Amino acid sequence: MKFGYLGRSGMRVSRLCLGTAAFGSEKKKPGDYGSVTEQEAHNIMDAALDAGINFFDTANVYGDLGQRGITEEIIGRWFAKGGSRRERVVLGTKVGRMFDDDIIDGPNQPQGLSLYKIRRHFEASLKRLQTDHIELYQMHHVDRNVLWEELWEAFEGLVRQGKVDYIGSSNFAGRDLLKAQSSAKERHFMGLISEQHGYSLVNRYAELDTLPTARDLGIGVTIFSPLARGLLALDITRPVPQTLSGHARKLLESHRPQLEQYSALCRELGEKEAHVALAWLLANPAISAPIIGPCTVAELEDSLRAVEIELDEPTLRRLDEIFPAPRELNIFQ
């Protein structure tokens, strides 16, 4: 496994980050939230450590319907097995998101951010994860109804208490990153060290705003949905697997001509489509790590090949021709 720094921090993380959103029950089809059994999740995490992956990502809302938080519980029970599992992991979790089944009555519902909510959700995450600290605590979404002075009061307090090492964000636009860092600087606080963002060969809009802003600010970027919900793992010459998500199926028809060219290029390279898509992300100096979401140990081990691939300039140009970079942001998309 190869390692790099998370932004301009001194934290070294593996170039692949293990995503855990699928850890939960086995009620759904592979790839969905909560589709991986606890035993298989433990096997995957053990295999990740054995492969040198030290960077794990989760969130306080991951889990099946009516079981939000179960993913953190699964990780906590894995930590409790000992064997230096907790000490070997750079753990990131999130706060601030809510699903429809989480809604409760009252003015201070779980959705969004505030000092009040952050403190309570953080303590709940610690309990589920069976740990006394978090390396990376991330805001799941921006909350423009709350002043940064309040947010930094909450997050800075956790850092000063030694309960959190670093603060990160997710789904932030470039302007949000700028505001966050400007406010943190006024408090003589280091602010954000990472931003988690959706980005792939078929979704390159982050290049217009978030990626360049993050790089200028020294914020490392981790990537969710690097394979576009499995779309970029398809060999378009073969039947579409039943496990492909509905969202990816919709994208498939609009991107079919591009995917045909992409599969042809991958055949020329002698590499799998998923490996090339991940290698393309790893070639971007703004990106610290794509987040992979294997549902089996075999899928995890297969993903490791991407770290060894170094795409040359002609190949990168060809990928730009197949999946052109956006020229302007379509605010209606």
Image: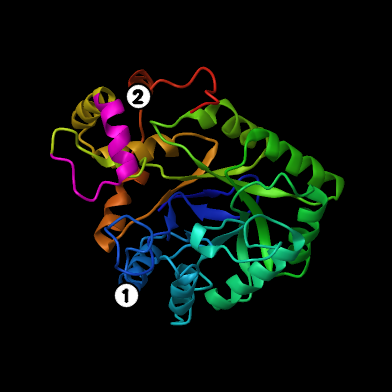
The label on residue 319 is 2
Which amino acid is tagged 1? Answer: Gln
Find numbered disc 1 in the image and state the secondary structure of the residue it sits on. helix
Residue farthest toward the front in the current orientation of the protein: 105
Residue 243 horizontal/vertical position (percent)? 23, 51
How crowded is the residue under tag 1: few (<14 C-alpha within 10 Å), some, or many (20+)? few
Q: Earlier in the sequence, mark 1 or mark 2?
A: 1
Return the x and y of residue 30 as percentages of the image width and height: 27, 58
**Rendering quarter of residue 22:** bottom left
- Residue 220 percent location from the top left of the image: 59, 44
Q: Nearer the viewer, residue 50 or 165?
A: 165
In-image side of 49 versus 189 (left or right): left
* Coloring scheme used: rainbow
| Residue 247 among magenta residues | yes
285 is within the stretch colored magenta: no
Specify the segment rendered in magenta.
Answer: 239-256
Q: Residue at x 30, y 60 (%)?
A: 295
Residue at x 64%, y 32% (from the top left corner): 213
State which quadrant residue 328 falls in: top right
In the rendered structure, which amino acid carries the disc numbered 2? Leu
Image height of 122 relative to 169, above or below: below
Residue situated furthest left in the rendering: 238
Measured Cα–Cα span from mark 1 to mark 2? 39 Å
Say which residue appears at 64% left-offset and 68% top-offset: 121
